[in-house]
Image (cartoon, rainbow, N blue to C red):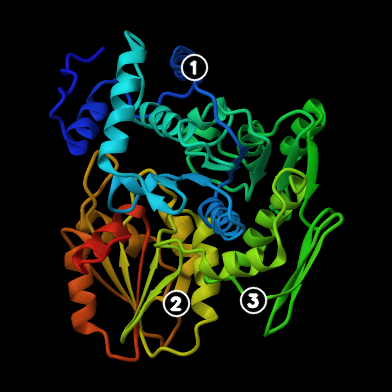
Amino acid sequence: MSSARTPDASATLPDWLQYLESIHATAIDMGLDRVREVAGRMGLALSGVKFVVGGTNGKGSTCAMLEAILLAAGYKVGLYTSPHLIDFNERARINGQIATDEALIAQFQAVEAARGEVSLTYFEFTTLAILRLFSQSRLDAVVLEVGLGGRLDAVNIVDADCSIVTSVDLDHTDWLGDTREKIGFEKAHIYRSGRPAICSDPMPPQSLLDHVQEIGADLWLFGRDFNYSGDRQQWAYGGREQRRNSLAYPALRGANQLLNASAALAALESVRDRLPIPQQAVRLGLLQASLPGRFQILPGQPAVILDVAHNPHAAAVLAQNLDNMGFHPYTHAVFGMLNDKDLAGVIAKLGTRIDNWYCAGLPGPRGTTGEALAQQVAAALPPTPAGGEKPGISSYADPAQAFAAARERAGENDRIVVFGSFLTVASVLQALGRKA
């Protein structure tokens, strides 16, 4: 147990967050016993239909679309996502509005009072606080994004009415295992017996399918129970009994967004008796859904693309999206990545698309210096073909400095892609004076 003093009545949100970072010995401590005990003491109960969304990539986009469609249909909705880009408050939204400092502090006080001697991680403590905020808000629907894995993630104390696993790929291998089968097993545990279990991974691991069968969940598989089709102008969703035709493409850009959108629509179809959604709400919601840092293209020249891609699967999607953008003479990458990630795997997916690498240092125990990152990038890049130009590699103290250097070098028809971590994208957004 930490000797940190409980914040007093005058404590600000940053005071509380600093305290929460200090009260548990480790940042990640898998298991539900502690968090479940405190939830029980608090009598936590959520009203409305509960959606829990897990997966390696695509979780955030699927959550954003679910929230936007439900809001467009006139429902009261709570959305919990993590991590945040700039302000912690981004993690909790009620009816599309980000939670205030005051609302969060009141919930932190309640969790602190209830936990007694039970030690909670930052994520567990804040999850309980946000769930309590939702429980007091008389919501029709709650959309909850899993933080890490599924089976032992704090969000999994919620008994979901409908669960979605978007994709299963290698990430967080220290915690979840080093194969898709092991990771699929962890993620499948957000599914519930007799309830809709949506899987939008086109090739789900056998471990996920086995777990669904074992618990008797109602499996909705992409390609079997739901699908999408499209042309250049519009697309259509086909489910078990519902068709949604003549849909505009989602406002969220990128190659995988129809897969994410169809998962959201399958989830909504599966609970349509409780939450009917008119066609117009689907159209409007898809156009209004937004998610900072997921293939986000900023207006102006040169083109600036922000993408939090930090594993090989996400990097492959980023590469595909870059290929779909049309011609740019040079591509400059502002790149910052945590040291527990598969750097070689990420660089292999982006290969020869990057002409100049601006390697940025990141803070914290999982961070690394710009110089060390530059050396790793140089080692991971494929050999330059005969007669080809070798990519430039330079290093900087932080992403803001790396971005400034890229801006200086880039021609107005070039593009700058900022990626590798939430921290990298957040730093550049802040340098640009933007809110997430």
List x then y, in percent, for residue 159. 63, 28
Circle 3 sits on which residue?
248
Characterize the local packing of mark 1: few (<14), some (14-19) or many (20 or more) Cα atoms within 10 angstroms.
Answer: few
Residue 83 in view (yes/no): no
Kindly identify which numbered label has been placed on residue 43. Answer: 1
N-terminal label among 2 and 3: 3
- Specify the amino acid type for callout 1: Gly
Q: Are marks 3 and 1 in contact (CB under 8 Å)?
A: no
Q: Residue furthest top?
A: 117
Kindly identify which numbered label has been placed on residue 353. Answer: 2
Judging depth in this view, the residue of 168 and 18 nearest the camera is 18
**Residue at 34% in and 28% down:** 107
SS at badge 2: helix
Q: CA distance from mark 1 to mark 2?
A: 53 Å
**Is the residue 434 above or below the residue 165 in the image?**
below
Q: Are marks 2 and 3 in contact (CB under 8 Å)?
A: no
List x then y, in percent, for residue 18. 20, 32
Judging depth in this view, the residue of 394 and 397 nearest the camera is 397
Q: Residue furthest left?
A: 10
